[in-house]
Amino acid sequence: MLRFRSRCRSVAGATIRSVSRFLNRTASIGPNDYAARPYKYFGRGSIISWPTGNMYGERWISIGEDTMIASDVTLSAGMVPGQEMLTDPVVMIGDRCLIGRGSSIVGHYRIDIGNDVFTGMNVYITDQNHGYEDPQTPIGIQDPLDDPVVIGDGSWIGTGAVVLPGARIGRNCVIAANSVVRGEFPPHSVIAGVPGKVVRAYDGMKWNRPQS
């Protein structure tokens, strides 16, 4: 009897997993799907995996070719329906990118992610921060501050990293896991820490560590 129950459980589990994989593949969004139409651009060979995260302001979001957006990723542009944006697109993701599961890309002015950029899980990228100039007014209701974000081609952003407004990351950079980054960084830099700093840099011939 116990062996029979174990066999039934095994068969049922295999069936559920098979159905789940089928549903996930079917529900994922590709360039030819109706759900891809609202986007500014949805490139050939790209996919948004199911289950999707929150998607908002698709009209202002461009996704390049052969790019994979993993499950539970939030992509947003703007804050309110019908909002006229100052740039078009607001969020631009290049070709052959991989955005890791659970990440969030929240744009209000301009986030430009280059080609061949990979991220780990739970990465947060935004170009807007709350204002806090008036000490008498709650921070949450002060006017926000926008500053464009640029992430260069071929860069890698580790799990849990936060890329803040005004970050300008050069090509082929590494942002270490759980780092918090803002400011400008040259190509071929390894950036780590809170706040993020260059811990290694390539000068065209060898890797160097900055002087303390």
Image (tube, rainbow, N blue to C red):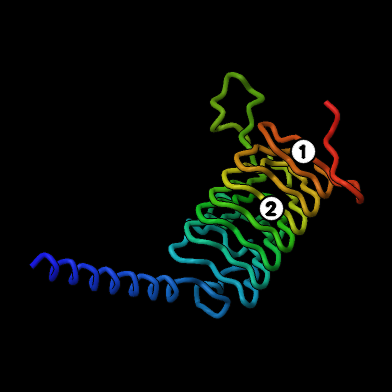
Q: Residue at x 69, y 50 (%)?
A: 109
Categorize mark 2 by other alpha carbons within 10 Å: few (<14), some (14-19), many (20+).
many
Compared across the picture, whether 132 is left or right of 187 comes to left
Q: Position of residue 183 (x, y in %)?
A: 77, 38
Q: Position of residue 125 (x, y in %)?
A: 63, 47
Residue at disc 2, secondary structure: strand
**Quarter in which the C terminus is drawn:** top right
Compared across the picture, whether 115 is left or right of 187 comes to left
Seen from the viewer's position, the closer of residues 50 and 36 is: 50
Q: On the image, which quarter does residue 61 sit in? A: bottom right
**Quarter in which the N terminus is drawn:** bottom left
Q: Position of residue 13 (x, y in %)?
A: 27, 68
Q: CA distance from mark 1 to mark 2?
A: 17 Å
Q: Residue at x 54, y 48 (%)?
A: 122
Please say if 155 is above or below 192: below
Please say if 146 is above or below 83: above
Seen from the viewer's position, the closer of residues 49 and 37 is: 49
Compared across the picture, whether 45 is left or right of 3 comes to right
Q: Residue at x 33, y 74 (%)?
A: 19
Total count of labels: 2
Categorize mark 1 by other alpha carbons within 10 Å: few (<14), some (14-19), many (20+).
some
Residue at the bottom extreme of this rendering: 32
Q: Residue at x 67, y 61 (%)?
A: 93
Pointer 1 residue: 183
Residue at the top extreme of this rendering: 136
Q: Which amino acid, mark 2?
A: Trp
Q: On the image, which quarter does residue 177 sit in? A: top right
Q: Nearer the viewer, mark 1 or mark 2?
A: 2
Q: Which mark is residue 156?
A: 2
